[in-house]
Image (tube, helix red, strand yellow):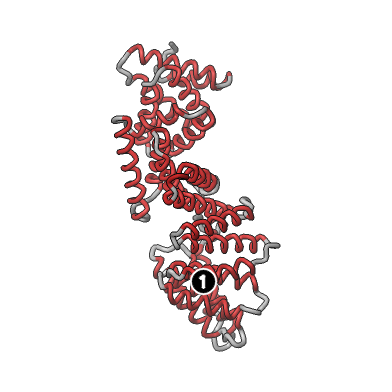
Amino acid sequence: MTDIRAAQGIDPQQAIRELEAQLRQTPRALRPHEHAVLSYRLGLAHAEAPAANPEAGLRKALSYFDTAAAIFDPRYDPVEHARVLNGAGAARRALADRAKAAELFQTAADLLEGRDRDDERAGVLNNLGLVRAELGQLDQAVAACDVAVELFDTNTAEGRRGRVAALHTRGMAAAAAGTDDGLESALADYRLAASEIDVDEAPYHYGLVHHSIGVTFSALAGRRPDDRRRLLLEAVSAFEASLKVFTRSDFPFQHAMVKHNLGLAWAGLGGVTDLRRALANLEDAVGMFDPRLHGDPWRQAYASLERTEKELGRLTGGLSRAGHFVALLAALDAVERRALLKERLAVILAQPGEQRRRSLVDLALEGAKLDPATTRRLIDSELSVLIELPIDQQEPGLRARFEAHRLLEDEEQREEADRALDYAISDALQGPQRVSVRDFLYSIGWERP
């Protein structure tokens, strides 16, 4: 997830340095309340700042929270003390000290009760629900979220986001029971949350809730074989909705996570085309996860990719991944084919030079081996995507298409591929675009058939 400070152009480390300077100029003995406020803010800053050693940052945050908590007396400053405990609880949870985190959240929630701070108390209770669920205390997690859901003020954007978050937390706690009733209860909460989300107001929540809907439908599909196909298609729909927000550029980790689960849903449907859909999504997931940072998710996604590839090999023979992707494109309608190709070309064009060239050539070559009508449809879609890109991205795609046709050993097949390219240029492009594309192709040695 993109760091908020970075998105706003704020350097987190600079903010910390400025707060530390203010703290040094604010003696605890002379100005205790201000000292406590600055300590609390420094705790939050250290907890949220990206760092090479996250644990060290969290430990530093706890030291500042301890200072603030010691100054804010819960008898006289209950709200301030509760806020500090909530921050400390979040840091403890991040350090996997969940029992201590639950204790801190519970104390904070108790301090806020009856203080006319309903949204704050609801936020703390949502945190309590999260950590109770992680501790396996599912009934207590649900109970905390029950209160949170009712407390949030839905007349404000923040309150609406908070309520959706609490519904999502309650759903996760219910689903963790692993029963049909628990999954159905989770699905009801997720659907209610989805119905209350404004995607522009809460894009992250939108993506998260729809991803959880997909995961729940997938889990139900595993328990209900007679209704498996319908449930998996529901999961696919939910995952695709999630990807509208969890894009590759804005939420790379979440994007990879959803892609993996979407791939598993397609694989569960079976059949060659759906397995090829699965393979395409799992390739995306493996490519997005950084094995150094996301070791377990990467290994899981790679294992899923290998299983799917093996099953496709059993059903269809020894096609390459590029071959399966092109066969998938050929099986889709024009709209879906173009969307899928646009996504894949964006990934390939972001690769380093030689890797990009090989990937583009492999894709073009597999398409050129098909029957002329199919090759023409594929090139139509390819050109309609390439022509919208900057020149420095158009040209590698066109050059790869030319190179792939030259690699065809059968002269008649090569001529058919060039003819399909010429027809596609006429069909897919407007006048000036046709001239531009043909001129570039002529410049690298292409001869119009």
**According to the image, label 1 marks what residue?**
128
Residue 94 placed where, x, y %?
A: 44, 68
Give the left or right position of residue 187, taking residue 420 as reference: right
* In the image, residue 16 above or below residue 290: below
Toward which corner of the image does residue 188 lie, by quadrant?
Answer: bottom right
Looking at this view, is 148 or 270 the one in front? 270
Q: How many marks?
A: 1
Looking at this view, is 155 or 400 the one in front? 155
Which corner quadrant holds the C terminus? top left
The reply to whether residue 16 is visible in this rendering is no
Residue 375 placed where, x, y %?
A: 43, 21
Element marked by disc 1: helix
> Which residue is at a point 40% across and 18% down the rendered structure image?
371
* In the image, residue 51 above or below residue 195: below
> Which residue is at a point 36% across and 15% down the rendered structure image?
413
**Which kind of residue does numbered mark 1 sit on?**
Leu
* In the image, residue 118 above or below residue 330: below
Looking at this view, is 90 or 386 the one in front? 90
Give the left or right position of residue 196, taking residue 41 as reference: right
> Which residue is at a point 68% across and 76% down the rendered structure image?
116
Give the left or right position of residue 321, taking residue 240 as reference: left
> Which residue is at a point 55% across and 78% down the rendered structure image?
108
Q: Residues within 10 Å of mark 1 (few under 14, many from 20)?
A: many
Residue 158 placed where, x, y %?
A: 64, 62
Looking at this view, is 268 or 310 the one in front? 268
Residue 74 placed where, x, y %?
A: 57, 85
The reply to whether residue 448 is visible in this rendering is yes
**Farthest-out residue, front:** 226
**Farthest-out residue, right:** 155
